[in-house]
Amino acid sequence: MTAAHSSATKNGWKTAKVNAASAVSTPARRMALKTPRSMTETESYPDREGVRYGVIDTPTGPISIAADKESLIEITLGGGPRIDARLTGVGRDAKKQLAEYLRGKRRVFDLPLLMSAPTFTARVLAEVESIPFGETRSYGEVAELIGSPRAARAIGQAVGSNPLPIVIPCHRVLAARRKLGGFGGGHDALDWKRYLLALEESDWVE
């Protein structure tokens, strides 16, 4: 089954449902990933000095964000801390830009990002970050683009570990023959992937 997009606006949010296809393409400015500071996968964000949380409630579920004074650190779709602090600086900008994207008012993000990742994963996510709004790539295409044509499965694992979904648009990476593939975006992950692809009027095959 081929799936794609029909949109409407409800309470200010752009909503999407599967029924018709139309791809949108626009150039995207590549954002530079900041050099990671000391941070590990087991580190607890609530214990990090200066980290604040915010929550965006959407028709698809909550989006939790974590940011410190300098960088956006984490985005969790459909889960994460329900703390909704008074965000300042980068956190406030991230919340505003994500809300604009979900309302269909933004296609490119302009935020300083911070993440800790192995070299291969960082290369993959940098390539994924460059996929424009409304376009998609397959895992195999991303593998070719980073010079590792036999690493499609490893690409999937790297994309699945993305700590900053939407801003680093891992939902734009599909399996071969435009099949939906997997998604590591959080709770009800594939529902989020379908929603984000439909929001951007991209098509895929279930």
Image (spheres, rainbow, N blue to C red):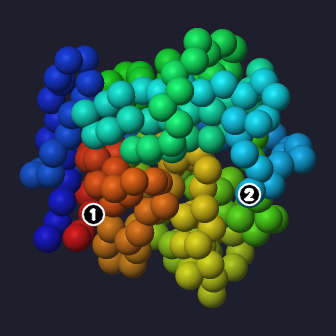
Which of the pair 122/88 is nearer the observer?
88
Vertical placement of 186 versus 146: above or below?
above
Residue contact at pointers 1 and 2, CB within 8 angstroms: no
Residue sitting at x 18%, y 24% = 9
Q: Secondary structure at mark 1?
A: strand
Residue carrying label 1: 204
* Foreground of the two, 67 or 150: 67
Q: Residue at x 81, y 65 (%)?
A: 119
On residue 177, the disc is none
- Locate residue 177: give its quadrant: bottom left
What residue sits 51% from the left and 42% below the top?
A: 80
Percent x, y of residue 41? 74, 57
Lower sequence index among marks 1 and 2: 2
Above or below — where is 187 with respect to 143?
A: above
Residue furthest toward the bottom? 150
Quadrant position of residue 178: bottom left
Q: Mark on residue 41?
A: 2
- Residue 55 shows in this picture: yes
Total labels: the figure holds 2
Element marked by disc 2: loop
Quadrant (top left/top right/bottom left/bottom right) for the C terminus: bottom left
Residue 70 in the image: state x and y as whole percent: 78, 25
Amino acid tagged 1:
Trp
Left or right of residue 26, residue 125 in this image = right
Q: Position of residue 17 (x, y in %)?
A: 15, 45
How many C-alpha atoms fall within 10 Å of the one at disc 2: few (<14), some, or many (≥20)?
few
User: Callout 2, which amino acid?
Assistant: Glu
- Mark 1–mark 2 Cα distance, whole angstroms, equals 32 Å
Q: Is residue 189 left or right of residue 109?
A: left
- Above or below residue 200? Residue 170 is below
